Amino acid sequence: MDIERRIELITRAPVEEVVTIEELRELLQTKEHPSAYDGFEPSGIAHLGSGLLRAIKIADLLEAGVKFKLFVADWHAWCNNKLGGSLENIQTAGKYLIEAWRACGVDTKKVEVVWASDVVKDPEYWKTVLAFSKASTVDRIKRCSTIIGRREGEMQYMSMFIYPLMQAVDPFFLKTEICQLGMDQRRVYMLSRELGPKLGYNKPIVISHHLMIGLQGPSKMGGFDTNKAVDEEIASKMSKSIPNTAIFIHDSPEEIKKKISEAFCPAKQTEENPILEICKYIVFRKQKSLNIDRPAKFGGPLEFSGYEELEKAFREGLHPADLKTAVSDSIIKILEPVRKHFEKDKTAKKLLEQVKGFSVTR
């Protein structure tokens, strides 16, 4: 496979930004199988973004010849007081996440799963964290608070200041050249790029993907980032701590239909429309077409073979109710294997029941 095709796969939607594309091209020219990673706080039930979308993007990277590591950031979640600050519960949620990714289509034989609780056993790790702390200011670390889903004023505990320093050094101890995470994580990797080379490490390439907008639509209650567009994206994303904003991978067909029927989807509005985003990032990546079954008196059935075609039709008057019905049917079908995995696999079922019993905290 030629380099341009590999770049096309790596940067395919939902990727929004690459820092930098020139460095990515050079990396692919010098290394056949570079390494990338994404990290997750185990802090609750997976939704479309953390489950299905993650699986879809990993498939792109694997096809491009990239070795991928899934980082279970259990110590980071502990620093962030997730699941009531119980490390035991957090690690149970981490085991559940691995089952969730497997159920969503991640080939766990082709990716490497790494736990933060193993990485932190290396004394050199903490030496590097301290070195980063000596080279960073309190204000700089506060500005990285978006990575833990908090505004600067919400950094209440000292552990929340340690978290960004840990994440900034993670790529070096995971031995990865590419950080492939959400747009809300980019600030900390700018710190990695700035300080890493000064301490003898590589400068990681940062590939940031879009955060799927929550079902509530765009939120103006930001305060996460000085970049207005990024700030709104973070404020509006699907969130497991606000259940009505998200479709979870275990939602029943009835729950999916109800959530989608009540979702923000203004007629003819194609920007910041959560239902269209589900089509763009999930539906058309998991199935070849989207079928809209309408009675003849309302125009008859429609079939769309690509997102651009659907977006155009919606802009020109396709009714939101018709779109929502079709998307509900598609998501129910796409999530069926996930539901079956957690029904039939005894380990997965037990982990899901345990995590559902935890109190989800921000």
Image (tube, rainbow, N blue to C red):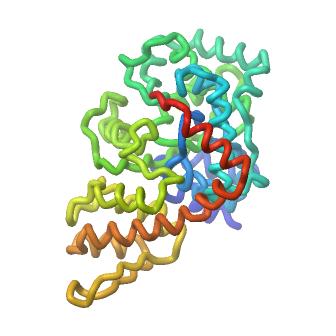
Q: Please tell me whether residue 354 is drawn above or below residue 33 in the rendered image.
A: above
Quadrant containing the C terminus in the rendered view: top left
Q: Percent from the top left, x then y, of residue 72?
A: 66, 36
Quadrant containing the N terminus in the rendered view: bottom right
The residue depicted at 73 percent of the width and 42 percent of the height is 113
The residue depicted at 45 percent of the width and 50 percent of the height is 16
Q: Nearer the viewer, residue 114 or 225?
A: 114
Residue 197 appears in the figure: no
Residue 306 in which image quadrant? bottom left
Question: Position of 22 compared to 257: left or right?
Answer: right
The residue depicted at 61 percent of the width and 16 percent of the height is 132
Q: Percent from the top left, x then y, of residue 206?
A: 56, 40
Q: Percent from the top left, x then y, of residue 136?
A: 53, 14
Give the mark count: 0
Question: Position of 237 compared to 314: left or right?
Answer: right
Question: Position of 233 compared to 331: left or right?
Answer: left
The residue depicted at 43 percent of the width and 36 percent of the height is 241
Residue 347 appears in the figure: yes
Q: Please tell me whether residue 351 is drawn above or below residue 14 in the rendered image.
A: above
Q: Nearer the viewer, residue 302 or 204?
A: 302
Q: Nearer the viewer, residue 287 or 332?
A: 332
Residue 243 in which image quadrant? top left
Looking at the image, the residue that sits furthest to the bottom is 296
